[in-house]
Amino acid sequence: MKNSPVINKQSINDGYIPAPYELEKGEAINDRYLEPVYFENENGPTIGVTTCGVIVQDGLYFKDLDNSGKMAPFKDWRLDDETRAKDMVHYLRLDQQAGLVLNTLWNTPVVPTRAEATDEAGKLALNKIYKKHDPSEPEPPSPIPGISTHVDDKDILERKITGGVYRGDMNVEAAMSALYHNAGTQMLEYEASLGGVAIPYSLHTNPINIGYPDSLGIAAAVMGEGNYDLVHEMAHVDRSMMKAAGQNVLYGPQVDIATDPRWPRNSGTYGEVPEVTAGIVSELVKGYQDGTDGLNKDSVVLTVKHFPGDGPSENGFESHMAIGQWRLYPTAGSLEKYHLPPFQAAFDLQASGIMPNYSRITTDSRTKPQTYRGKMTSKEVVATAYSKELLDGLARETMGFNGYVNSDSGIVTSQIYGVEELSIPERYAKAIAAGTDVVGGTADPEHIVEAVEKGYLAKEDLDRASYNRLLSLFKTKRVDNPYLDPEHANKVRAEKLDGAKKAAYQANQKSIVLAKNHGAVLPLKPNKKVYIACFKGVDTGAAFMAAAMGLKEVPKDDPEAFRQKLVALFEEKGHVIVDTPEEADYAYLHVWPMTNGMVFNQFAMPVIDLVDNQLFDEREVNKSQKRTGNKVSITTLKDVAKIKEISELVHNNGGKVIASCVVTSPWLLDKLEPYVDGMTFQYTTSKVALDQVLRAQVEVVVGEFSPTGKMPLTMVSSPEVIALNEVEIDGEIREVCVSPNDVPGYDKDQYIKPEILANVKGGSYAYCDEDGNYYRAGFGLHYEV
């Protein structure tokens, strides 16, 4: 591979600088990693190239994005972003346009550190950064139905796909993420030598938790503080680390409002209070996009999801599987009142992207017609990515959204609700024509090409999608120099991470909710004998994640190791740990239930009861949801019956029982709360920060930190308030919930029949404890230390 010398700016006149690298006969662009070469404009952007030439005009440098040697508007950084993006569309080959509007799903550097990414000569090896395609190796089976989780350089070199979802975590060196991004860009840039245009590579990522509590925990913390300062700080710092590492697009935040308590993705929301979620997303937009004027060079592109809100799922079924494909709105005005305010808040601040949900609206008698600002929202019974009424009509025309639409993964292969009869090219055509600009998680651009060539998809619709995707690249100033400095990526993380971890720790402290404090049992008195027990549910998503990550074995929980962490913390605080409940002044129970309704494991209705090996009806995994006659064993909390046993042993000896319950769902607490004197709620975080979360929790229990958190979810009082009645609708037997699927828990009482509430302890949908406190969103006790 030839390497041309870099020509200093002061020594040249207007003209042309050839690409610094040129392939020799027999070489391929993926044979080795190319160090980018830079040309600095005194009052303009730096130009970064590998196999593109540089145009010199008026004493300025311009990247020759198609290696034609000719100037064009899309190459001219002096023009506005809209003009450049619109012009660039016309230079793209059809196969490039097809690749531009797709994302691969599972992108991870081959090795986690730069030290491991070098060859025998000490030089960076491209095949140790970006996986190289081996035609002799068959593609491994995917754990996700209809979607490939196997990503290699074939997706770029042959399929021309310009983006992928990054799956690394904080254990992967920031420099490796930057190098992965550069490697993808290097391969895409070579298109300029093949009659195409150089398009920067884009890494999308789901939020990578650096130790903050999960979304529910963030909501609990800000509700307690009464402001959103910690959210803005988190987003601002995270943005700088993401940008340096080449993670330019965030698949989030998830601003669905939690309204059906059984929905397993409640755990990823900011709870059920629309005003709180709207306040949080406002600060996230400001922090990640670096302001309120839309995208700029320092922005991370946000993808606010799942428009128009996936919370009102039918009885909690999850739309990743066909059994959960329906969204219900039994309450007039609920879409406008509860579900759209967070999206409107994001759109008002020029959020850069949205991700539609998989689900589709019902149009039978279970759903009331929904309007927004006086306009009907939708009647077409298709998944939102296929709905022109929702994407163009509601989002863009009525709500003022002006970014791009990025679908969730699988809309053309597995979550094909309402378009089952269409061919794959026809599905692409319908989605793009409806307003979807980027289709996530798929790797078959040939179907988009076919859709255009056979007339299913109008070229102007594909041009619009291409323009919207390109515009975000121009606005974030990634076209003229998309290359990153790996050393800088590590430096930024090193500079920011310690401070971020401290802020995250404080957020974990603030997120803890004191729910029960009978007889002022908390904080614990010092120097007491403490018995510790840990209870946990079954992680139904572990097998899926292990398969997707290519692990040969599913990681297993070690309850004793978890308990030993708590033992060490309590001993550090001066307490004596005892081996039996009978010896204890206090029993401390760490309770971590887990729902059965996780993605791709939903074969029974999601359960929020605390149950151990209890049988429930198996359902057909399709839109009928019919019972098969078989039973499914479900465990949301192993050994739950032992909670009562331990409680009785401790209380019989005059001791007290304290519990900490991890909240990922609005749990039914009848097997926990009556047996404890004090109880806190806490929230999940990343595994790397688990020790810190436990420390924050223990500090609240022993009185070193005054609890301030407020509940973001309403705990359900009893099975009666979420009971299902069979109703014949349009000739089919459907199950209708006695409380509406589309209304948050704090507001459900007005919609439940009085005779149902009359037979419920406390007379409310919200759980009522022995002290008369209602575990409703916004509730949280406090004590001073």
Image (tube, rainbow, N blue to C red):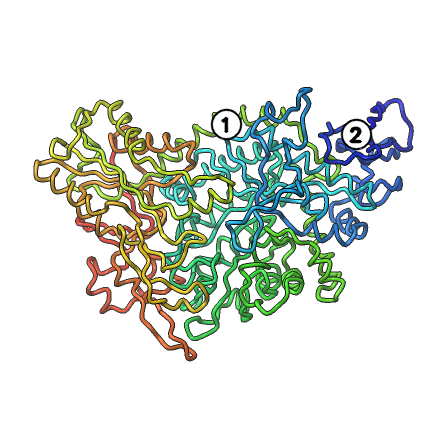
Identify the element where label 1 is drawn.
helix
What amino acid is at disc 2?
Answer: Asn
Q: Is residue 348 left or right of residue 50?
A: left
Residue 401 is marked as none
* Picture layout, residue 258 above or below residue 239: below
Residue at (45, 36) in percent of width and height:
230
Residue at (72, 43) in percent of width and height:
157
Residue linked to disc 2: 41
Tell me how far mark 1 sits from mark 2, CA to CA.
32 Å
Q: Quadrant of the N terminus?
A: top right
Residue 124 picture quarter: top right
Can you give x and y, in whole percent of width and height, for residue 603 in the image? 39, 59
Task: Tell me which label, 1 or 2, sits earlier in the chain.
Answer: 2
Can you give x and y, in whole percent of width and height, for residue 327 in the image? 46, 64
Residue linked to disc 1: 497
What amino acid is at disc 1?
Answer: Leu
Q: Is residue 751 visible?
A: no
* Picture layout, residue 569 above or below residue 783: above
Residue at (36, 65) in percent of width and height:
740
Can you give x and y, in whole percent of width and height, for residue 177 in the image? 60, 33
Observer-nearest of 111 and 611: 111
